[in-house]
Amino acid sequence: MAGLVIVGGSYAGLNMAQAARQHGYGEPIVMLTDEQYLPYHRPPLSKGFLTGDSDVESLLIKGEKFYEDQQINVVLGARAEAVEREGRVVTKRGVFAFDALGIVTGTRAREIPVPGTDLDGVVSLRSLADAEAIKARMDKVRAVAIVGGGFIGLELAASFAKSGIDVQIFEAAPRVMARIVGETISDYVEQRFASEGVALCCGLGIEEIEGRNGKVAAVRDTKDKRHPVDMVVMAVGATPNTELVEPLGLADQFGVRVDVNGRTLHPGIYAAGDCAFGPNIFAGRDMRLESVQNATDQAKAAGAAIAGAEFVNDAVPWFWSDQFDMKLQMVGFVEGANRQVVRGSIEDGKFSVFHLKDTRIVCIESVNAVSDHVAGRKLLKLPHSVDPEMLRDTSVKLRDLVST
Amino acid sequence: MPKIVYKTHEGKVYEVDVPSGRSVMLGATSQGVPGIDADCGGTLSCATCHVYVAQEWAEKLPPVEEMEDELLENTACERKSNSRLSCQIDVTDELDGLVVEIPERQF
Ligand SMILES: Cc1cc2nc3c(=O)[nH]c(=O)nc-3n(C[C@H](O)[C@H](O)[C@H](O)COP(=O)(O)OP(=O)(O)OC[C@H]3O[C@@H](n4cnc5c(N)ncnc54)[C@H](O)[C@@H]3O)c2cc1C
Ligand code: FES
């Protein structure tokens, strides 16, 4: 038997392999990754990693021993170049035959057509290698422009500001993190960044990156103002890595199309994580998500299916981001809400924004209100109802307020 | 190097040498000890690194801080007086021999 070949070595790849084994898959498992490391935690890269002294080993999701025990053969530095319909993956490190194939290739930093992105000093952050390259530059850098006010751009801005670097953020949309949070949180975060001395311009993009001797010298914004900087971080979102299975007709611009068990249209080929577009039971529609939770849970379902078992992924979507002293945590989706209630104190920086559809909570966005968030992760899964006004009473625990 | 003893829900025992400064969570994930998921990589966001600390050790650990306390309120398995998040326990020489039990589930 040729077994399972997994292309991509991160959260989705690891969980797919682990779930397959857990459900009794006994054939060989090979995990191909184009990186030089075993699967590692990406979130710290834009958070503590740049300012702290964490080493690579402490970033690994699992140590080597785990792969030995589970008989998962990880091949580092093996970029899959092509998938052949007959059941083979081609890499520079050999050709790998498969019975089942997992496409868990994630995303790459999105590129935008701005002149100057090829200059030395223009960077983006997706991988540990990217983070190491940024860290190596930080000593010499005095002023940074961050293009994109999503969570990665903001986290990086906070890390740079903490290191005494001048930071300016350009966000073309009217508010930060518009794709993932509601207005109340965007407003709050924008104010916190301002109070930390970070220049944050919403509704302002960049027109050009100017260079001198091949190096970044300045950015010119869409209002034609010039800002001298010595580094530019492009943080304008991510593009799914779907190229491998596009020739097989398994992907489009939204991602690799999957069903609820991670099956693509081609028998034996599965996908999960950041690259996959498919049904989200919680939301009741198809979508592509970029989060550790989603990659983990989708891959568990796909791994089970590969082993011939069933694992229903009805997980409640959740996400977090750490910026300065703000721990932002989101659970559920704002869409469909018709009412908003703030629980806690915005002034004290410890509150949650509850989004409700009538008397049902559909989303909780928390700032340093961990207990609301974790309670929500359980609650949103169940049918429930709550008196919206009662949510304001922080003396009563959330779980005691809601009838399920 | 301090030794940490992990007991799984199924009753398997793993003795792992964990360098000082590493967390009890990392001691488990780096050496293939099953049952500690640690989805957030120790950034105090997930509560999937829950352990029960053997009673005789519970007082020797630094106290539970506010965020950890709040995360512990909603662990998958019941919170007990000796519940901790293993990513928040840094190994020191004084913790040589620490025994932790891993709950049945983390999510
Ligand atoms: C800086 C940063 C911070 C983040 N912070 C958070 C956070 O706080 N919370 C959160 O929930 N999420 C966060 N995320 C998102 C989270 O990391 C992703 O959702 C998650 O990593 C997705 O996992 P994945 O396995 O689907 O894909 P990825 O992690 O993208 O992994 C895909 C892997 O496949 C490899 N690959 C791609 N193509 C090939 C090929 N052809 N051959 C071989 N290998 C290939 C890639 O190099 C990569 O190693 C963050 C992401 C980044 C970059
Ligand atoms: S690893 Fe996530 S809280 Fe401990």
Image (cartoon, grey):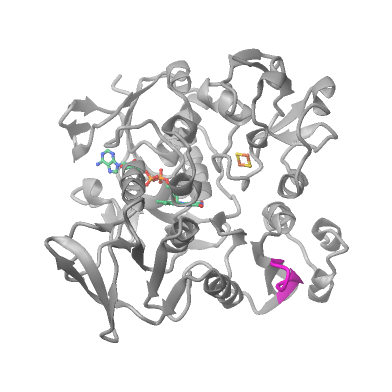
Q: Main secondary structure of the magenta part?
A: strand
* Nearer to us in this view, B54 or A332: B54
Across and down, in percent, residue A357 comes to 68, 74
Image quarter of residue A387: bottom right
Across and down, in percent, residue A318 comes to 58, 55
* Nearer to us in this view, B34 or B41: B41
Image quarter of residue A272: top left
Left or right: A119 as drawn, with respect to A223: left
Q: Residue at x 55, y 56 (%)?
A: A322
* Residue A257 shows up from this direction: no
Q: Residue furthest left?
A: A213
Instruction: Look at the image and give the residue range highlighted in magenta.
Output: A341-350
Placement of the C terminus of chain A among the 4 image quadrants:
bottom right
Left or right: A197 as drawn, with respect to A96: right
Residue A2 lies in the magenta-colored region: no
Image quarter of residue A352: bottom right
Q: Residue furthest bottom?
A: A223
